[in-house]
Amino acid sequence: MTTIAQSSSTSGAVTPNQPSSVHTRRYEGPPSGWWFAGPAVAIIAVFFLAPIAASILLSLTDFDIYALADWRNLRFVGLQNYIQLLHSERFWIALHNTLYFVAIGGPLSVAASLGAALLLESKLTRLKVVWRTVFFAPVVTTLVAVAIVWRYLYHTKYGLFNLALTKLGFEPIDWLGDPHWAMPAVIFLAVWKNFGYNMIIFMAGLQSIPSELYEAAEVDGAGPARRFWHVTLPMLGPTFLFVGVTTIIGFFQLFAEPYVMTQGGPGESTYSLVMLMYEQGFRWWRLGFASAVAMTIFTLTLAATLMQVWLQRRAGA
Amino acid sequence: MRYVKLFITNAAVALLGLLVVAPLLWMVAAAFMPRGTAQTYPPPLWPAEPTLDNFRELFSRLHLGRYLFNSLAISLSITGFGLLLNAMAGYAFAKLRFTGREQVFRTLLAALVMPLQVGMLPLFLMLKQLGLINTYWAVIIPSMATIYGIFMVRQYALAIPDSLLDAARLDGASEWRLFFTIVLPLLRPVLATLGIFTFLSAWNDFMWPLIVLTGSENYTLPVALAILSTEHVQDAELMMAGSLITILPVLGLFILLQRQLIGGIMVGGVKG
């Protein structure tokens, strides 16, 4: 995100607000740019920003199905929803599962993206445009649809994954039926679905590294591994920050994959925080309690983002 | 030695490519298999006797045509509104002066990292008060403008020379005429990218339509598919046909317009 802030401030400096030519000095500017910016800003303020703010307030009330019928049943309960959350076993399970998904799936996805980008940017690779299209294709597919496809691919008896495993001489795995394998199965799907996006960003990052740096390193006798560690990785720093932050935000929102493939099971092993929010809020209509879950998701996302920025700064300093 | 390296690199890329397309290829193959033949041992990789029965059943008994129409109507509306409103706002933030411009823009940028789910519960209550739950509008309105869209257009519009706009103003063109006849044509490349992005994310969206489209007559394809899949767990072939119909429009769009899409991500990711 800092890359965005930086580029916007620099571009602001390049194009000053003052009219540039003599002729335009007489021109006082349009009555108000708000006619143009207004509709979009209003939509975002009313339907995106206000609900986020309202979510904080809602989490301090006991909004439930009775309040849904009649707002007079609404009461202010302070932090009671949060206290209840901390005493809820399901919350800790969902938190654990979500952190597992983010902490393993996120880095795995970023590593796959970087690996694929390096392969595609290699001078030796042929048919680059074709492979780029192929690797990116899962990104544009509909998550619900591919989750259904993967549910059948994971089938213990008739699924292609176990067919491949048994052909290679391994034991078949009960992917979606074994609590230990269900989350890894969800992670594999998420990595497959997402890695193409970050791959493109890494490719752009790799292309922006000046080739003189590699040549200089080669003259100094650095092999491919050392060139990767001492030239490629440091030069990709800003890209890593961007990719890391967007990936973390995305992975915290785990919902459709378990909803379609496992319904949160087996034994709640893929039950996520967003699922908890959805179930409490929209199935049991406990909107106050569900808002406390929403605020938890928000706080976690923010904390992870800030940590990522901080780590990057420290590595850069 | 060079040829060995060449071989290894390309073999690795090809293997990875095969792993990536395999799930999609199997989906296509299974969609044309007769009922009950995909889940036999050993699992067939290709339909021995291809059939269109799965598609027929989806469109006749399971009303997939209705869901396809809902998905198209909602996604196209979001794309249309989104392009217009984000283009107007992006242009304004880049080229027009108005009170509070910098503050508002900075606020929007700060909110860029907010996950959508955080506001879903109050948003639902708001739309319920407005009587919009279980209408297309409940899905369309919140997506009509996005911070990312405004930002994308603004970055592109910054490059429009002020002198061009001022010359048109001196000729007496109104601000709206100026926008529609000069600015919009100049923004065409970024609007193409934004349009594809918007359509893809609207088409693929699942959680919000699942929440606000409560009646089955209004389901979008992903919502209908998720609900059908719980009732038809045994019907692998039927579900693969449904998945294929859901994915085909977006995959086709991507293959046709991949240059705009991938180019847009490259610019957006690196320059911000």
Image (tube, helix red, strand yellow):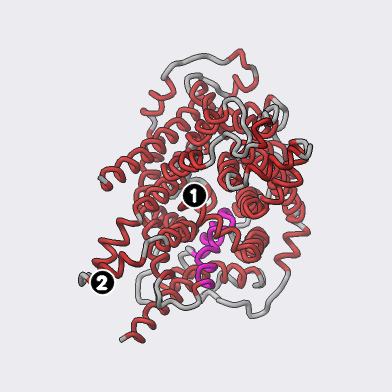
- The residue at which mark 1 appears reads as A258
Residue B59 on image: x %, y %: 76, 59
- The residue at which mark 2 appears reads as A218
- Name of the residue lying farthest toward the front: A22
Q: Residue at x 36, y 54 (%)?
A: A107
**Pick the front one: A58 or B153:** B153
- Circle 1 SS class: helix
For badge 2, the amino acid type reads Glu
Please state the extent of the stretch shown in magenta in the rendering: A129-153
Residue A40 on image: x %, y %: 65, 35
Residue B143, by quadrant, is: top right
Is residue A140 found inside the magenta-colored segment of the image?
yes
For badge 1, the amino acid type reads Pro
Name the disc covering residue A126, or none.
none
Residue B92, by quadrant, is: top right
Overall secondary structure of the magenta section: helix
Residue A289 on image: x %, y %: 48, 26
Q: Residue at x 53, y 61 (%)?
A: A138
**Pick the front one: A233 or A93:** A233
Pointer 2 chain:
A
Q: Are marks 1 and 2 in contact (CB under 8 Å)?
A: no
